[in-house]
Amino acid sequence: MDLAFLDPLYEDTGPWASVYVDLSRRTENMVHERELTAEALSRQLAEQGADERTCHAVRDAVHDLRHSSDAHGRALFARDGRVLLDPPLARRPAGGSTAHWAPLPHTAPLLELAGEDPVCVVAYVDRRGADLELRSGALGSQDAGTVTGEQWPLHRTHTNAWSTKHFELKVENTWEQNAAEIAQALAACQEETRADLLILVGDVRERRAVHERLPKHLRGRVMETDHGAGSRLLDDDVERIRAEHVWRRAGDELDRFLAARDPGADGRAGAVEGVPAVIEAAREHRIEELLIHPDGPDAHREVWVGEDPDQLAVRRSDLRAIGEEHAWPARADDALLRAAAVTGAPALSVTPAGVDDAPVGGVGALLRWK
Protein backbone atom coordinates (compact mmCIF):
# COMPACT_ATOMS: atom_id res chain seq x y z
CA MET A 1 0.00 0.00 0.00
CA ASP A 2 1.41 3.35 -1.06
CA LEU A 3 1.10 5.61 1.99
CA ALA A 4 1.60 8.93 0.19
CA PHE A 5 -2.10 9.79 0.45
CA LEU A 6 -1.69 9.93 4.24
CA ASP A 7 0.80 12.83 4.08
CA PRO A 8 -1.77 15.48 5.14
CA LEU A 9 -2.17 13.63 8.45
CA TYR A 10 1.48 13.98 9.36
CA GLU A 11 1.98 17.68 8.67
CA ASP A 12 0.53 18.67 12.06
CA THR A 13 0.59 17.29 15.55
CA GLY A 14 -2.51 15.77 17.16
CA PRO A 15 -4.57 14.72 18.88
CA TRP A 16 -6.65 13.24 16.08
CA ALA A 17 -10.15 11.93 15.57
CA SER A 18 -10.12 8.78 13.42
CA VAL A 19 -13.55 7.54 12.37
CA TYR A 20 -14.48 4.50 10.29
CA VAL A 21 -18.03 4.70 8.94
CA ASP A 22 -19.89 1.61 7.76
CA LEU A 23 -22.01 2.56 4.73
CA SER A 24 -22.73 -0.96 3.53
CA ARG A 25 -26.27 -1.24 4.91
CA ARG A 26 -29.09 -0.49 2.49
CA THR A 27 -32.50 -0.27 4.18
CA GLU A 28 -35.65 1.79 3.89
CA ASN A 29 -34.52 3.76 6.95
CA MET A 30 -30.94 4.17 5.71
CA VAL A 31 -30.90 7.99 5.85
CA HIS A 32 -32.27 8.08 9.39
CA GLU A 33 -29.88 5.33 10.53
CA ARG A 34 -26.91 7.26 9.17
CA GLU A 35 -28.05 10.42 10.94
CA LEU A 36 -28.13 8.44 14.19
CA THR A 37 -24.65 7.09 13.40
CA ALA A 38 -23.34 10.64 12.98
CA GLU A 39 -24.64 11.60 16.42
CA ALA A 40 -23.33 8.41 18.04
CA LEU A 41 -19.80 8.82 16.62
CA SER A 42 -19.67 12.44 17.75
CA ARG A 43 -20.67 11.38 21.27
CA GLN A 44 -18.03 8.64 21.31
CA LEU A 45 -15.34 11.17 20.46
CA ALA A 46 -16.56 13.57 23.14
CA GLU A 47 -16.48 10.78 25.72
CA GLN A 48 -12.86 10.08 24.77
CA GLY A 49 -11.91 13.73 25.32
CA ALA A 50 -12.17 15.23 21.84
CA ASP A 51 -12.78 18.97 21.60
CA GLU A 52 -16.23 20.22 20.69
CA ARG A 53 -15.25 21.71 17.31
CA THR A 54 -13.75 18.45 16.11
CA CYS A 55 -16.75 16.46 17.32
CA HIS A 56 -19.04 18.78 15.37
CA ALA A 57 -16.87 18.54 12.25
CA VAL A 58 -17.03 14.74 12.34
CA ARG A 59 -20.76 14.76 13.01
CA ASP A 60 -21.38 17.06 10.04
CA ALA A 61 -19.12 15.01 7.76
CA VAL A 62 -20.86 11.73 8.62
CA HIS A 63 -24.23 13.45 8.30
CA ASP A 64 -23.26 14.52 4.78
CA LEU A 65 -22.79 10.83 3.93
CA ARG A 66 -26.42 9.95 4.67
CA HIS A 67 -27.19 9.74 0.92
CA SER A 68 -23.76 8.36 -0.07
CA SER A 69 -23.63 5.55 -2.60
CA ASP A 70 -20.28 4.27 -1.27
CA ALA A 71 -20.48 0.50 -1.34
CA HIS A 72 -18.50 -0.14 1.84
CA GLY A 73 -17.67 2.89 3.93
CA ARG A 74 -15.50 5.89 4.52
CA ALA A 75 -12.65 6.82 6.87
CA LEU A 76 -12.53 10.33 8.34
CA PHE A 77 -9.52 11.95 10.00
CA ALA A 78 -10.08 15.25 11.79
CA ARG A 79 -8.38 17.66 14.16
CA ASP A 80 -8.85 21.23 15.32
CA GLY A 81 -12.41 21.36 13.96
CA ARG A 82 -11.62 20.16 10.42
CA VAL A 83 -11.81 16.88 8.52
CA LEU A 84 -8.51 16.71 6.64
CA LEU A 85 -8.83 13.35 4.90
CA ASP A 86 -11.78 11.10 4.01
CA PRO A 87 -10.71 8.16 1.83
CA PRO A 88 -13.31 5.61 0.68
CA LEU A 89 -13.01 2.05 1.94
CA ALA A 90 -12.71 -1.04 -0.25
CA ARG A 91 -14.23 -3.26 2.46
CA ARG A 92 -16.79 -2.62 5.17
CA PRO A 93 -15.48 -2.17 8.73
CA ALA A 94 -16.00 -5.58 10.31
CA GLY A 95 -17.06 -4.18 13.67
CA GLY A 96 -19.33 -1.48 12.27
CA SER A 97 -18.73 2.26 12.64
CA THR A 98 -16.07 3.26 15.19
CA ALA A 99 -14.44 6.43 16.49
CA HIS A 100 -10.99 6.92 18.07
CA TRP A 101 -9.34 9.92 19.74
CA ALA A 102 -5.56 9.59 20.11
CA PRO A 103 -2.26 11.48 19.75
CA LEU A 104 -1.76 9.93 16.28
CA PRO A 105 -4.30 9.22 13.54
CA HIS A 106 -5.46 5.61 13.79
CA THR A 107 -4.49 4.59 10.26
CA ALA A 108 -3.71 0.89 10.85
CA PRO A 109 -7.21 -0.32 9.84
CA LEU A 110 -6.67 1.16 6.38
CA LEU A 111 -4.24 -1.68 5.60
CA GLU A 112 -7.20 -4.06 5.69
CA LEU A 113 -10.02 -1.74 4.66
CA ALA A 114 -8.40 0.37 1.94
CA GLY A 115 -5.02 -1.17 1.23
CA GLU A 116 -4.45 -3.73 -1.50
CA ASP A 117 -7.59 -2.74 -3.35
CA PRO A 118 -6.53 -3.89 -6.82
CA VAL A 119 -7.95 -1.78 -9.62
CA CYS A 120 -9.00 -3.94 -12.57
CA VAL A 121 -9.67 -3.12 -16.20
CA VAL A 122 -12.08 -5.70 -17.59
CA ALA A 123 -12.08 -6.06 -21.39
CA TYR A 124 -15.10 -7.78 -22.94
CA VAL A 125 -13.48 -8.89 -26.19
CA ASP A 126 -14.98 -10.07 -29.46
CA ARG A 127 -13.93 -9.92 -33.11
CA ARG A 128 -15.39 -6.44 -33.58
CA GLY A 129 -13.68 -4.74 -30.64
CA ALA A 130 -14.06 -4.53 -26.87
CA ASP A 131 -15.97 -2.81 -24.08
CA LEU A 132 -13.72 -1.69 -21.23
CA GLU A 133 -14.82 -1.49 -17.61
CA LEU A 134 -12.98 -0.23 -14.54
CA ARG A 135 -13.60 -2.21 -11.35
CA SER A 136 -12.37 -1.68 -7.78
CA GLY A 137 -13.65 -2.24 -4.27
CA ALA A 138 -13.81 1.46 -3.41
CA LEU A 139 -15.09 2.79 -6.75
CA GLY A 140 -17.32 -0.09 -7.83
CA SER A 141 -17.85 -0.36 -11.58
CA GLN A 142 -17.22 2.40 -14.13
CA ASP A 143 -17.36 2.50 -17.91
CA ALA A 144 -13.83 2.87 -19.30
CA GLY A 145 -14.64 3.20 -23.00
CA THR A 146 -15.17 1.14 -26.13
CA VAL A 147 -12.75 -0.08 -28.79
CA THR A 148 -14.31 -0.37 -32.24
CA GLY A 149 -12.19 -2.21 -34.76
CA GLU A 150 -12.67 -3.04 -38.43
CA GLN A 151 -16.16 -4.45 -38.98
CA TRP A 152 -15.59 -6.29 -42.27
CA PRO A 153 -14.62 -8.92 -43.14
CA LEU A 154 -14.98 -10.81 -39.84
CA HIS A 155 -16.15 -14.32 -40.81
CA ARG A 156 -14.64 -17.04 -42.95
CA THR A 157 -16.55 -18.68 -45.78
CA HIS A 158 -17.40 -22.37 -45.61
CA THR A 159 -16.32 -23.32 -49.13
CA ASN A 160 -13.03 -24.67 -50.38
CA ALA A 161 -12.98 -22.74 -53.66
CA TRP A 162 -9.66 -21.16 -54.48
CA SER A 163 -11.39 -17.76 -54.80
CA THR A 164 -12.10 -17.74 -51.08
CA LYS A 165 -8.44 -17.90 -50.02
CA HIS A 166 -7.88 -14.21 -50.54
CA PHE A 167 -11.05 -13.38 -48.60
CA GLU A 168 -10.03 -15.62 -45.68
CA LEU A 169 -6.67 -13.86 -45.55
CA LYS A 170 -8.51 -10.57 -45.18
CA VAL A 171 -10.54 -12.06 -42.34
CA GLU A 172 -7.35 -13.10 -40.55
CA ASN A 173 -5.89 -9.64 -41.07
CA THR A 174 -9.04 -8.03 -39.66
CA TRP A 175 -8.90 -10.17 -36.52
CA GLU A 176 -5.22 -9.37 -35.99
CA GLN A 177 -5.74 -5.67 -36.55
CA ASN A 178 -8.65 -5.52 -34.11
CA ALA A 179 -6.69 -7.47 -31.47
CA ALA A 180 -3.81 -5.03 -31.81
CA GLU A 181 -6.15 -2.04 -31.41
CA ILE A 182 -7.72 -3.57 -28.30
CA ALA A 183 -4.30 -4.29 -26.80
CA GLN A 184 -3.20 -0.72 -27.49
CA ALA A 185 -6.33 0.69 -25.86
CA LEU A 186 -5.89 -1.59 -22.84
CA ALA A 187 -2.28 -0.48 -22.39
CA ALA A 188 -3.34 3.18 -22.55
CA CYS A 189 -6.15 2.58 -20.04
CA GLN A 190 -3.77 0.81 -17.65
CA GLU A 191 -1.26 3.66 -17.85
CA GLU A 192 -3.96 6.24 -17.17
CA THR A 193 -5.65 4.37 -14.30
CA ARG A 194 -2.56 2.58 -12.91
CA ALA A 195 -4.66 -0.59 -12.88
CA ASP A 196 -3.16 -3.59 -11.12
CA LEU A 197 -4.94 -6.21 -13.24
CA LEU A 198 -6.21 -6.61 -16.79
CA ILE A 199 -9.02 -9.17 -17.08
CA LEU A 200 -9.89 -10.53 -20.52
CA VAL A 201 -13.39 -11.90 -21.15
CA GLY A 202 -14.38 -13.52 -24.45
CA ASP A 203 -13.77 -16.54 -26.65
CA VAL A 204 -10.38 -18.23 -26.28
CA ARG A 205 -8.95 -17.21 -29.65
CA GLU A 206 -9.85 -13.52 -29.27
CA ARG A 207 -8.59 -13.37 -25.67
CA ARG A 208 -5.32 -15.00 -26.64
CA ALA A 209 -4.81 -12.68 -29.61
CA VAL A 210 -5.19 -9.60 -27.40
CA HIS A 211 -3.02 -11.07 -24.64
CA GLU A 212 -0.15 -11.77 -27.04
CA ARG A 213 -0.21 -8.21 -28.40
CA LEU A 214 0.00 -6.45 -25.05
CA PRO A 215 3.35 -4.85 -24.09
CA LYS A 216 5.60 -7.35 -22.33
CA HIS A 217 5.64 -5.41 -19.06
CA LEU A 218 1.85 -5.82 -18.78
CA ARG A 219 1.50 -9.51 -19.58
CA GLY A 220 2.16 -10.49 -15.97
CA ARG A 221 -0.88 -8.44 -14.93
CA VAL A 222 -3.30 -10.27 -17.25
CA MET A 223 -5.87 -12.85 -16.20
CA GLU A 224 -8.14 -14.61 -18.70
CA THR A 225 -11.53 -15.93 -17.65
CA ASP A 226 -13.54 -18.89 -18.92
CA HIS A 227 -16.48 -16.66 -19.75
CA GLY A 228 -17.19 -16.61 -23.49
CA ALA A 229 -18.12 -13.75 -25.78
CA GLY A 230 -21.25 -11.92 -24.69
CA SER A 231 -20.75 -12.79 -21.00
CA ARG A 232 -20.48 -10.22 -18.22
CA LEU A 233 -18.50 -10.73 -15.03
CA LEU A 234 -20.50 -10.74 -11.82
CA ASP A 235 -19.23 -8.88 -8.76
CA ASP A 236 -18.34 -12.23 -7.16
CA ASP A 237 -16.20 -13.15 -10.19
CA VAL A 238 -14.23 -9.91 -9.99
CA GLU A 239 -13.86 -10.14 -6.22
CA ARG A 240 -12.48 -13.68 -6.52
CA ILE A 241 -9.87 -12.54 -9.07
CA ARG A 242 -8.96 -9.51 -6.97
CA ALA A 243 -8.62 -11.65 -3.82
CA GLU A 244 -6.36 -14.09 -5.65
CA HIS A 245 -4.13 -11.20 -6.73
CA VAL A 246 -3.92 -9.87 -3.14
CA TRP A 247 -3.11 -13.35 -1.82
CA ARG A 248 -0.30 -13.79 -4.34
CA ARG A 249 1.13 -10.33 -3.65
CA ALA A 250 1.13 -10.86 0.14
CA GLY A 251 2.68 -14.29 -0.27
CA ASP A 252 5.44 -13.01 -2.55
CA GLU A 253 6.36 -10.18 -0.18
CA LEU A 254 6.29 -12.49 2.83
CA ASP A 255 8.59 -14.94 1.04
CA ARG A 256 10.96 -12.06 0.30
CA PHE A 257 10.86 -11.03 3.95
CA LEU A 258 11.50 -14.55 5.24
CA ALA A 259 14.51 -14.93 2.95
CA ALA A 260 15.90 -11.51 3.88
CA ARG A 261 15.73 -11.96 7.65
CA ASP A 262 18.45 -14.62 7.55
CA PRO A 263 21.94 -13.07 7.78
CA GLY A 264 23.90 -12.96 4.54
CA ALA A 265 27.61 -13.61 3.97
CA ASP A 266 28.44 -10.37 5.77
CA GLY A 267 26.51 -11.50 8.85
CA ARG A 268 23.78 -8.88 8.39
CA ALA A 269 20.11 -9.44 7.69
CA GLY A 270 18.03 -7.59 5.11
CA ALA A 271 14.92 -7.66 7.30
CA VAL A 272 14.00 -7.24 10.95
CA GLU A 273 10.99 -8.24 13.02
CA GLY A 274 9.49 -7.39 16.36
CA VAL A 275 8.58 -3.90 17.60
CA PRO A 276 11.97 -2.88 19.11
CA ALA A 277 13.96 -3.82 15.98
CA VAL A 278 11.48 -2.22 13.57
CA ILE A 279 11.37 0.98 15.65
CA GLU A 280 15.16 1.18 15.49
CA ALA A 281 15.01 0.81 11.70
CA ALA A 282 12.32 3.50 11.51
CA ARG A 283 14.42 5.95 13.53
CA GLU A 284 17.27 5.41 11.07
CA HIS A 285 14.98 5.75 7.99
CA ARG A 286 15.92 2.24 6.89
CA ILE A 287 12.47 0.77 6.23
CA GLU A 288 12.01 -0.26 2.60
CA GLU A 289 8.62 -1.89 3.23
CA LEU A 290 6.66 -2.25 6.45
CA LEU A 291 4.87 -5.56 7.03
CA ILE A 292 2.07 -5.72 9.59
CA HIS A 293 -0.26 -8.47 10.71
CA PRO A 294 -3.11 -6.40 12.24
CA ASP A 295 -4.00 -9.18 14.70
CA GLY A 296 -0.39 -9.72 15.78
CA PRO A 297 0.07 -9.44 19.56
CA ASP A 298 2.51 -6.51 19.33
CA ALA A 299 0.92 -4.54 16.49
CA HIS A 300 -1.22 -2.56 18.93
CA ARG A 301 1.15 -2.44 21.90
CA GLU A 302 1.93 0.93 23.40
CA VAL A 303 5.04 2.78 22.30
CA TRP A 304 6.09 6.40 22.72
CA VAL A 305 6.23 9.08 20.04
CA GLY A 306 7.46 12.66 19.75
CA GLU A 307 6.41 15.45 17.42
CA ASP A 308 8.55 14.20 14.52
CA PRO A 309 7.77 10.87 12.81
CA ASP A 310 11.22 9.43 13.48
CA GLN A 311 10.94 10.20 17.18
CA LEU A 312 9.56 6.92 18.49
CA ALA A 313 10.72 4.48 21.11
CA VAL A 314 9.63 1.48 23.13
CA ARG A 315 10.04 3.41 26.40
CA ARG A 316 9.46 7.06 27.19
CA SER A 317 12.91 7.30 28.76
CA ASP A 318 14.44 6.31 25.41
CA LEU A 319 12.99 9.45 23.81
CA ARG A 320 14.29 11.62 26.61
CA ALA A 321 17.73 10.08 26.11
CA ILE A 322 17.80 11.43 22.53
CA GLY A 323 16.68 14.88 23.64
CA GLU A 324 12.92 14.72 22.98
CA GLU A 325 11.12 16.45 25.86
CA HIS A 326 7.54 15.92 24.62
CA ALA A 327 6.27 12.36 24.33
CA TRP A 328 2.89 10.69 23.99
CA PRO A 329 1.76 7.04 24.08
CA ALA A 330 0.59 5.58 20.75
CA ARG A 331 -0.15 2.25 19.14
CA ALA A 332 2.92 0.62 17.57
CA ASP A 333 1.25 0.08 14.18
CA ASP A 334 0.05 3.71 13.93
CA ALA A 335 3.47 5.05 14.95
CA LEU A 336 5.32 2.85 12.47
CA LEU A 337 2.93 3.72 9.64
CA ARG A 338 3.61 7.41 10.27
CA ALA A 339 7.36 6.80 10.18
CA ALA A 340 7.09 4.73 7.00
CA ALA A 341 4.85 7.24 5.23
CA VAL A 342 7.13 10.24 5.67
CA THR A 343 10.11 8.30 4.27
CA GLY A 344 8.17 7.02 1.24
CA ALA A 345 8.07 3.38 2.35
CA PRO A 346 4.97 1.31 1.49
CA ALA A 347 3.17 -0.93 3.97
CA LEU A 348 1.51 -4.28 3.54
CA SER A 349 -0.90 -6.37 5.56
CA VAL A 350 0.32 -9.97 5.52
CA THR A 351 -3.05 -11.33 6.67
CA PRO A 352 -3.89 -12.86 3.24
CA ALA A 353 -0.68 -14.89 3.32
CA GLY A 354 -1.59 -16.64 6.57
CA VAL A 355 -0.70 -16.30 10.23
CA ASP A 356 1.95 -18.99 10.61
CA ASP A 357 4.67 -17.17 8.69
CA ALA A 358 3.86 -13.67 9.95
CA PRO A 359 6.70 -11.56 11.42
CA VAL A 360 7.30 -11.97 15.15
CA GLY A 361 4.64 -10.09 17.07
CA GLY A 362 2.96 -9.13 13.83
CA VAL A 363 5.48 -6.41 12.88
CA GLY A 364 8.39 -6.66 10.45
CA ALA A 365 10.28 -4.64 7.86
CA LEU A 366 12.41 -5.14 4.79
CA LEU A 367 15.42 -2.85 5.00
CA ARG A 368 16.77 -0.35 2.50
CA TRP A 369 20.31 -1.22 3.45
CA LYS A 370 21.81 -3.69 5.87
Image (spheres, rainbow, N blue to C red):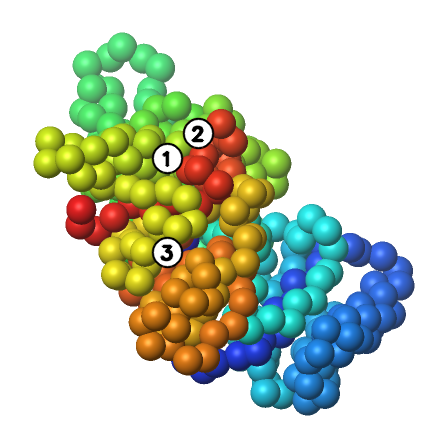
Q: Amino acid at mark 2?
A: Asp
Instruction: Answer yes or no: is residue 238 visible.
Output: no
Left or right: 93 as drawn, with respect to 178: right
In this view, the mark in front (2 or 3): 3
Mark 2 is surrounded, within 10 Å at the Cα level, by few (under 14), some (14 to 19) or many (20 or more) other residues, namely some
In the picture, the disc for residue 357 is 2
Q: Amino acid at mark 1?
A: Leu
In the picture, the disc for residue 279 is 3
Task: First in sequence, mark 1 or 2: give its number.
Answer: 1
Residue at left offset 48%, top offset 41%: 361
Q: Which residue is mark 1?
A: 254
Up/down of 153 relative to 330, above or below: above
Is 320 in front, or is 135?
320
Up/down of 259 relative to 272, above or below: above
In the picture, the disc for residue 189 is none
Find out whether the residues at labels 1 and 3 contact each other: C-beta distance under 8 Å.
Answer: no
CA distance for labels 1 and 3: 19 Å
User: Residue 232's quadrant in the figure?
Assistant: top right
- Label 2 residue SS: loop
Is 213 in front, or is 260?
260
